[in-house]
């Protein structure tokens, strides 16, 4: 019968004693013990050279492993992982290359090192799948703005405001805010616009301070953005994947920063935010960018922030109306409802190819349609 794992030594000893007995049939004994003649001669020759000790199993580890990762390289992998606990094999491999390390292991090898040292949970790794989404064709063509869910701070709550360039994934803003009001966001956006310039468009969700809900998408904040000639796009209701890059950024923020900010003062949170934002932009390899860093793809916007807003200009043939209190405009002796956020602003009306349907523009953004045949 074949040899069993738990009785290998006893079977080998018995095999050798029978082989060495007078009149033994070697081939028959090998067949009876379920081993090949080659294996039988191996154990017989070892026993003759080394005695019973020769029957023990030997390590199959090669004497030399030229392809094995150096101990110093493994230590460097563990060090980077310790500094950035959410980074996987691909990011660490890219970072080692940027640091000028020689003989950088393959990402799969680095992943194996992390698992061997207990730095990676295989079940947790399955949750981090790559997101698929569209991409703007140039820096500042589109910015994604949102708030990451608030958390407990030393006094009140901290609301992280995030602004991400869609093309480069460059984090333009990561601000610890005490609230989510339009005034707070406008103050921080002003600082960002002064430093980086204006984007062509922004992508925001339908909640405060970007909108009241899907049916009322305009607020004083979005009116101000449109006044700056920045197009405002609202995401589809109940579809957070529309803001996919921002959601992915929030996932990294939650994994790498937020656990260390709980209970801190807002100012202390901001220091941690700023330090991580610098790492994210200049050190952390981004898989969607072929492991480049966002800073390598971002450029400042050529559109400077105007400290004084220029006058609104419409076409010479556009009927222009001022939005009255309550969100009303008058045209052809009839009243039409306009979002209340535009109260006090001037809007232009332009006909469409459909009879009686007109479009209402504020600056260069279409804000709604009205039906002259049915004012109500």
Image (spheres, grey):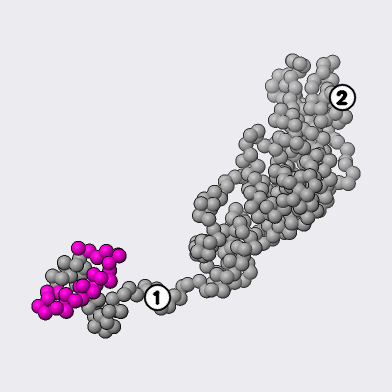
- Specify start and end residues of the magenta stretch as a single range: 1-26
> Element at badge 2?
loop
Secondary structure beneath dot 1 equals loop
182 relative to 6 in the view: left or right: right
Query: In the image shown, does 376 or 176 lie closer to the viewer?
Result: 176
Q: Earlier in the sequence, mark 2 or mark 1?
A: 1
**Residue 287 in sight here:** yes
Residue 156 spot, x, y in % from top left? 79, 44
For disc 1, the neighbor class at 10 Å (few under 14, some 14 to 19, many from 20) is few
What is the quadrant of residue 51 in the picture? bottom left
- Which SS type dominates the magenta stretch? helix
Does 265 sit above or below residue 58? above
Q: Is residue 13 rendered magenta in the image?
A: yes
Quadrant of the rendered structure where residue 295 is?
A: bottom right
Q: Is residue 246 magenta?
A: no
- Quarter containing the N terminus: bottom left
Q: Indicate which label's residue lies in the foreground, 2 or 1.
A: 1
Front residue of 117 and 249: 117
Mark-to-mark CA distance, 2 and 1? 85 Å
Spot occupied by residue 188 in the image (x, y as percentages of width and height): 81, 47
Tell me what residue is drawn at x 61 percent, y 56 percent: 86
Q: Which residue is mark 1?
A: 62
Residue placed under numbered mark 2 in the picture: 325
Q: Residue furthest right?
A: 308
Q: Please say whether residue 304 is visible from this viewpoint.
A: no
Question: Residue 119 at x, y = what percent?
Answer: 55, 61
What residue appears at the point 84 percent right and 41 percent down from the top-left corner? Answer: 183
Determine the residue positioned at 27% across, 67% down: 7
- Residue farthest along the bottom direction in this orientation: 49
Please state, as top left, top right, bottom left or bottom right, where the C terminus lies in the image. Answer: top right
């Amino acid at each position: 019968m074949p040899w069993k794992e738990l009785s290998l030594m006893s079977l080998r000893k018995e095999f050798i004693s029978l082989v060495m007995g007078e009149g033994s049939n070697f081939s028959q004994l090998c067949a009876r013990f379920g081993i090949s003649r080659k294996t039988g001669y191996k154990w017989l020759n070892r026993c003759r050279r080394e005695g019973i000790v020769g029957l023990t199993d030997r390590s199959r580890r090669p004497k030399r492993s030229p392809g094995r990762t150096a101990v110093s390289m493994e230590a460097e992998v563990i060090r980077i992982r310790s500094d950035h606990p959410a980074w996987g094999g691909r990011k660490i491999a890219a970072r080692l290359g940027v640091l000028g390390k020689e003989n950088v292991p393959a990402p799969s090898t680095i992943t194996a090192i992390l698992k061997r040292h207990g730095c990676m949970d295989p079940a947790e790794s399955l949750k981090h799948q790559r997101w698929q989404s569209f991409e703007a064709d140039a820096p500042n063509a589109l910015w994604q703005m949102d708030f990451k869910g608030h958390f407990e701070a030393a006094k009140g709550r901290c609301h992280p405001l995030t602004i991400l360039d869609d093309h480069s994934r460059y984090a333009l803003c990561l601000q610890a805010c005490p609230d989510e009001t339009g005034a707070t966001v406008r103050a921080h956006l002003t600082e960002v616009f002064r430093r980086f310039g204006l984007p062509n468009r922004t992508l925001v969700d339908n909640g405060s301070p970007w909108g009241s809900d899907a049916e009322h998408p305009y607020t004083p904040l979005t009116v101000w953005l449109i006044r700056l000639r920045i197009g405002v796009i609202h995401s589809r209701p109940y579809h957070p994947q529309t803001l996919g890059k921002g959601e992915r950024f929030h996932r990294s923020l939650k994994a790498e920063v937020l656990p260390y900010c709980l209970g801190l003062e807002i100012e202390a949170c901001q220091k941690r935010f700023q330090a991580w934002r610098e790492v994210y932009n200049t050190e952390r390899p981004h898989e969607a960018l072929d492991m480049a860093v966002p800073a390598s793809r971002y450029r400042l916007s050529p559109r400077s922030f105007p400290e004084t807003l220029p006058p609104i200009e419409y076409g010479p043939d556009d009927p222009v109306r001022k939005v009255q209190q309550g969100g009303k405009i008058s045209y052809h002796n009839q009243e039409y409802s306009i979002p209340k956020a535009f109260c006090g602003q001037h809007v232009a009306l332009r006909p469409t190819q459909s009879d009686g349907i007109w479009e209402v523009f504020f600056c260069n953004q279409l804000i709604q349609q009205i039906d002259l045949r049915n004012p109500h």
